[in-house]
Image (cartoon, rainbow, N blue to C red):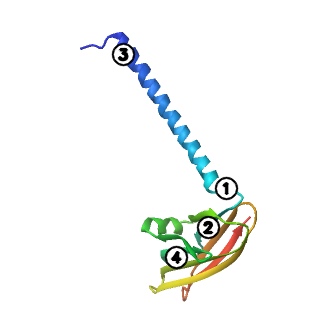
Amino acid sequence: MAVPFGQAAFADTLDSEIDRLKADVADLSQTLYELEEEVLYPANTQVAVFLTLKDREGLELDTVELYLNGTPVASHLYTERERGSLKQGGVQRLYIGNLPHGAHQLKAVLTARSANERFVRREVTHDFRKRPGESRLQMTLDARAPDFEPVVSFQEWK
């Protein structure tokens, strides 16, 4: 049965209007996300911690726990896919939050299996000073032959 011309035109107009409304909702959703980020993480007090691997074959990362001023702020259990991404040079954002200006302490606890098949657990602390503006800290894990002992270093991005 054929659809009368008037109904077909109405259906086409309705489909176009639905597509336009979907696009508007997507744009509004993105704008809302950006506003939430500005409210929740104002740039002046924002601190972010990133993780990288220096020697990509020395460690099979299992977990990382992050503490800021003694308070747990992040915990991550790694999948094979995530380990693979880090080994390919990926950078993981472990934490983003807000801190007042001044002195702070970051503590990381990591568990991993070294290339010589030993299970290792390391706990390291890093004292830093939060200054006005965004602060970004890079935590780098390294484990070189022959002992594959994990070494954790911190660097503040400028």
Count the marks: how many? 4
Compared across the picture, whether 10 is left or right of 103 comes to left
For badge 4, the amino acid type reads: Glu
Single out the mark in the foreground, 1 or 2. 1
Q: Earlier in the sequence, mark 2 or mark 3?
A: 3
Q: Tell me which residue sits at (61%, 55%) in the image.
A: 40
- Secondary structure of the residue carrying tag 3 is helix
- Residue 102: give x, y in percent of width and height: 74, 71
Quadrant where the C terminus lies?
bottom right
Q: Are marks 4 and 3 in contact (CB under 8 Å)?
A: no
Q: Which mark is residue 49?
A: 2
Q: Residue furthest left?
A: 1
For badge 1, the amino acid type reads: Pro
Q: Earlier in the sequence, mark 4 or mark 3?
A: 3
Single out the mark in the foreground, 1 or 3. 1
List the residue tagged with mark 1: 42
Measured Cα–Cα span from mark 1 to mark 3? 50 Å
Q: Tell me which residue sits at (69%, 61%) in the image.
A: 45
| Picture layout, residue 88 above or below residue 28 | below
Q: Residues within 10 Å of mark 4 (few under 14, many from 20)?
A: some
- Secondary structure of the residue carrying tag 1 is loop
List the residue tagged with mark 3: 8
Measured Cα–Cα span from mark 4 to mark 3? 62 Å
Q: Earlier in the sequence, mark 2 or mark 4?
A: 2
List the residue tagged with mark 4: 57
